[in-house]
Image (cartoon, rainbow, N blue to C red):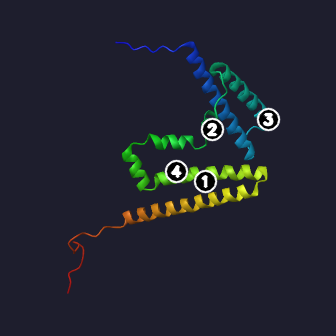
């Protein structure tokens, strides 16, 4: 038996427009952040912006409205890959990785990235209060990361210690006098 799913031309155009908006927004955000950090391709910024506008116009033509705030935020979410990876874990893996600190490390890295971007935006806008709040969040994330790493180090050291045999004497111990 063969299952065939037919998509209308309208559905295909909508999907293509949605994918193009996401792709162009991500490309723009990636290059823009790299330029802000002192790298990237500054000479492509305007072309990237034009690409975003054209993609938004094609989206509007296909959907009848511009991309939503959620669509835009989701397309350029710097933590999206980590969040999706964590959501894909089985319940067993999720419990294990939260217990051993692996998930806490990923979660803390996401917090630090968010705080870093907020610091830069506030600094560029001259918003000292918001910048200080973001720096406090950044510092809190660093302390949390240090705590998670220290706990994981202690657990590994404890696991690496030789275990004493139950019942007393080792076959290698000298007789008591």
Q: Position of residue 15 (x, y in %)?
A: 57, 22
| Residue highlighted by disc 3 | 43
**SS label for mark 1:** helix
- Please state, as top left, top right, bottom left or bottom right, where the C terminus lies in the image: bottom left
Work out how far the residue at label 1 is from the one at label 3, CA to CA, in angstroms: 29 Å
Q: Vertical placement of 114 versus 16: above or below?
A: below
Report how far apart the C-alphas of labels 2 and 1 lie in the structure.
18 Å
- Could you tell me which residue is drawn at 51 percent across and 63 percent down? 147
Instruction: Determine contact: label 2, label 3, CB under 8 Å.
Output: no
Q: Earlier in the sequence, mark 2 or mark 1?
A: 2
> Is 44 in front, or is 1?
1
Q: Residue at x 67, y 23 (%)?
A: 60
Q: Is residue 45 above or below residue 105?
A: above
Cβ atoms under marks 1 and 3 closer than 8 Å = no
Q: Give the quarter of the image for residue 127.
A: bottom right
Number of the label disc, if any, that sits on residue 106:
4
Quickly name the residue at label 1. 112
Residue 24: quarter of image: top right
N-terminal label among 4 and 2: 2
**Which one is closest to the eye, mark 1 or mark 3?**
1
Q: Residues within 10 Å of mark 1 (few under 14, many from 20)?
A: many
| Cα gap from disc 4 to disc 3, whole angstroms | 34 Å
Q: Nearer the viewer, mark 2 or mark 3?
A: 2
Q: Which element is circle 3 on?
A: helix
Q: Could you tell me how far apart the alpha carbons at marks 2 and 3 are, in whole angstroms?
A: 25 Å
Q: Is residue 159 left or right of residue 60?
A: left
Q: CA distance from mark 4 to mark 1?
A: 10 Å
Tell which of 132 and 35 is nearer to you.
Answer: 132
Where is mark 2, residue-wise? 73
Q: Are marks 2 and 1 in contact (CB under 8 Å)?
A: no
């Amino acid at each position: 038996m063969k299952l065939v799913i037919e998509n209308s031309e309208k559905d295909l155009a909508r999907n293509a427009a949605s994918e193009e908006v996401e792709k162009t927004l991500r490309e723009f955000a990636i290059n823009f952040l790299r330029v802000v950090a002192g790298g990237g391709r500054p000479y492509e910024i305007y072309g990237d912006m034009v690409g975003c506008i054209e993609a938004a116009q094609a989206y509007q033509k296909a959907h009848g409205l511009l991309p939503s705030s959620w669509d835009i935020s989701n397309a350029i979410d710097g933590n999206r890959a980590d969040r999706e990876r964590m959501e894909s874990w089985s319940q067993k893996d999720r419990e294990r990785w939260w217990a051993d600190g692996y998930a806490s490390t990923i979660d803390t890295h996401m917090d630090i990235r968010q705080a870093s971007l907020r610091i830069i935006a506030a600094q560029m806008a001259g918003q000292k209060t918001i910048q200080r709040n973001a720096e406090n969040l950044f510092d809190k994330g660093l302390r949390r990361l240090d705590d998670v790493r220290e706990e994981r180090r202690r657990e590994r050291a404890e696991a690496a210690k030789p275990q004493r045999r139950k019942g007393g004497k080792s076959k290698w111990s000298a007789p008591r006098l």
